[in-house]
Each structure stands twice: as structure tokens, then as C-alpha cells.
Amino acid sequence: MNTQELIITWATPVFFLLIGIELLVAKLRGRRAYASGDAVSSIGLGVISQIVGVFSKLLTLGIYAWCVQHLALFTLPADSLWVWAGALLMYDFCYYWLHRCGHEVNILWAAHVVHHQSEHYNLSTALRQTGSGVLLGWLFYLPMALLGVPLKVFVVVALIDLLYQFWVHTEQIGRLGWFDRVFCSPSNHRAHHAVNDRYLDRNYGGILIVWDRLFGSFVEEDDNDPPVYGTRAPLRSWNPLWANAEVYWHTAIDAWHAQRWRDKLLVWLKPPGWRPADVAARFPKPAFAMPCARFDPPLSSAVKFYVLLQFALLLAMATQFLGMAGTASLPTLLAYAAYLVAGLCVLGALMEGRHWAWWVESLRALATALVPLLSSQWFGISHLDGHIALAMTAVFGLSALALPWLHQSSRFTGLASAAN
């Protein structure tokens, strides 16, 4: 069973169960832990990250497997407990340096920034993952391949390290005493996600916070300075493609405007926020200041319900996509991936109040209703069950019919918000 199949079969339902528990606990405490737009955006970015993973296995795992086979200094047994324990420790060490460099090198920050864009801090933030981290992230784990850690062991310890980090993304768990001094914990990771001067670029550990204590990057959460979440250049958008491209785009523009060739390179390698002097002088940007108003465009209850319903359907389709990744043809996977990403982009535009998105969503709903009804197929699934085809037609057909009324509801909400 590969990593994605494992996530599909048990990890994903557990994630959403824990999100539900967090919502309930926050409600009982009288706190607002979630905003619908932010949660949809974060989970949608996680879906796109998983979609990218389907097409990037050759890069992320293929290179590692080749290095283990041809360059490894040792041959380590995959059935040794010590190999597994050592591999998990080493993976967490490598992750620390990838994570730290992701905050200190702009081209790596361009990928990692996605995880920090949420202005809320909850379990959905943990699912907010980059789609471009595969481009360079694999480099940091090559030492494990050179030491001969088997591919199977590498994949499993990587999954353990990733799954561990899910639960620390919450404000509902306070200090944990001695645990906070050794392990990455909710308190430690809240500080990591904060933009306050005190917390900026600290606490990079994945499982162990000991790495931060050893290398001078640890800071303790201070109740007198509550964490403020997000980035110092707020995204202010629910568009998942822009979320992934934002820093790359702004960096490319600065590189284009830089007069010296040296600066055109350095703008990618320097820490985030660094700009060549000539570029900063000609194209100044406003300085960061707190407090930061959260991005939260108003939505009517009807539009919010519609977006959440369509998002749930897209999640079900994404699960289906990941399940068929090992058997479907490449054109089918590419087409399905394009459909899913386009759907997430349109829902993001609806939540931003973009009027053009209603027309695009109408076309998407109509196409999703008619294709299974007329062809009994859905992206490579031949002879689609008649009941499923009728259900898809009914749901998306009714969605298309409801869109004009929802559009009016959205316009009314926007006008009322502007008047206030």
C-alpha cells in the first residue's frame, strides 16, 4: 500500500473527525476557531498538493530510489528496528533544515509560504500544503539515500513525520509542560506560525523541538504577546493557484526590474523580503504593521451553504481521483486534475464575490450534470452506475438552476456590507 492509498483509507477520515471535534470544543468554549472561506481554501490547497503528488512521484521518490541503489555508502536492512528509529530521527533532522531554509531562502519560501498564508490557526491549516515544494524539497533528504536508508523505510517515516504535525495546528490545546521542551507541540508551533516580531522565523522542528534548542531557533510562546497568524505580505485571496504562485511572481518581477545580474540571482537566494536597493527605491512597498485585519469577504448563508456543498463533492471526487491514480491513463488523470483544480478556483472566486465566477460555475455545474447522464462515464470510469449518474445529474442540475438566485443573494449581501 503506497502513501496516498494509506492516507485515503484511514488518515483522511481521521483528519476530518478531529476537525469536527475541534469545532465542537471551540464552540463549547465560545470561541470562533474556523472561518468557512479560510477552511475551504486551506483544505483545497491540500487537495492540490495531493494531486501534484500523483504526477511528481518520479521526481520525489524516483531520484531517491536511484540514489539508494547506485550511491548508497551502506546497505541497511529494512527489517531492523534500529534502522527504522534512526531513519525517523534523521528524517526529522533533515526536515528541520528544509523547514528552516524554507524561511531563510526566498525560492524555498516561495513554496513554503502556502502553509503560512492562513490568518487562522486550526487543524485545517495543517492540511494547507504547497503544490511546488516537490521542485527542491527532495534535495534535503538525499543524505538519507546516501546512507542507504531503504525507500520503503523512507516513505513510511516521512508519512509518520507528516502525520504527527497535524495535531499541533490548534489553539484548543494549551501548554504541555515537559512535552513542550522536547517535542513540537501546539504551543511551540503556534509561535512558529505567528508574524509577531518575537516569534518570527522560529520553532522549525517537525516532531522534535530539540533541534531548535540545539541550533538557536527556539522561542517560547508568551501569553503577554498572543500570536498573530498569517504572513507579513498577506495573500488576501482564496484562489489556490495564486496562493502557490504569489511569491514566485513577485520575485520574478523584482528580478526583472533589477539592474545588476547579481541581484537578479540574489533575489531568489536571499531571505524573504530582501529586495535590490534600486528595485526597492523605484518600486517601494508599504511596511508591515500590526494589527492585521483578516481577509474575510462577506457571504450570504445560502451562498456559503452552496460553496460548502460543492466543496464536499469536489473532495469526494478528489478521493476518487487519488484512488484511480495507479490505473488510469495519463490523459485521463490530467483532465480530471484540471477539472478539480478549476472547480476549486471557481469556488474561491465565488467566496471572493467575483461576478464572473457565477457564469463559470454555471457551466461547470451543467457539464458535471450532463456528462455522466449522456455518456455514463466519468473521467475514465466506464459504464458508470445508472443511479450514480442520475444522482450526479440531479445534484449538479439543481445547482445550476439555483445559481441565478444565489447570485442575487450574493449581490445583496455585498451591497449591505458596503453600506455598513
Image: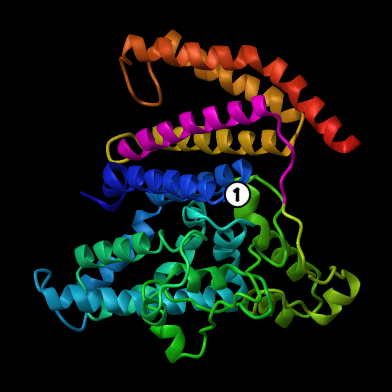
The span shown in magenta is: 295-324
Q: Quadrant of residue 206?
A: bottom left
Where does residue 96 sit, x and y in percent of width and height? Answer: 43, 77
- The one nearer the camera, 70 or 219, is 219
Q: Residues within 10 Å of mark 1 (few under 14, many from 20)?
A: few
Residue at 57 percent across and 68 percent down: it is 193
Q: Is residue 203 left or right of residue 223?
A: left
Q: Amino acid at mark 1?
A: Arg
Q: Residue at x 69, y 59 (%)?
A: 249
Q: Is 278 placed above or below 216 here?
A: above
* Residue 252 in the image, given as x and y percentages of width and height: 71, 64
Q: Residue at x 58, y 47 (%)?
A: 34
The residue identified by callout 1 is: 32
Q: Residue at x 85, y 31 (%)?
A: 416
* Residue 81 belongs to the span the image colors magenta: no
Q: Quadrant of residue 77?
A: bottom left
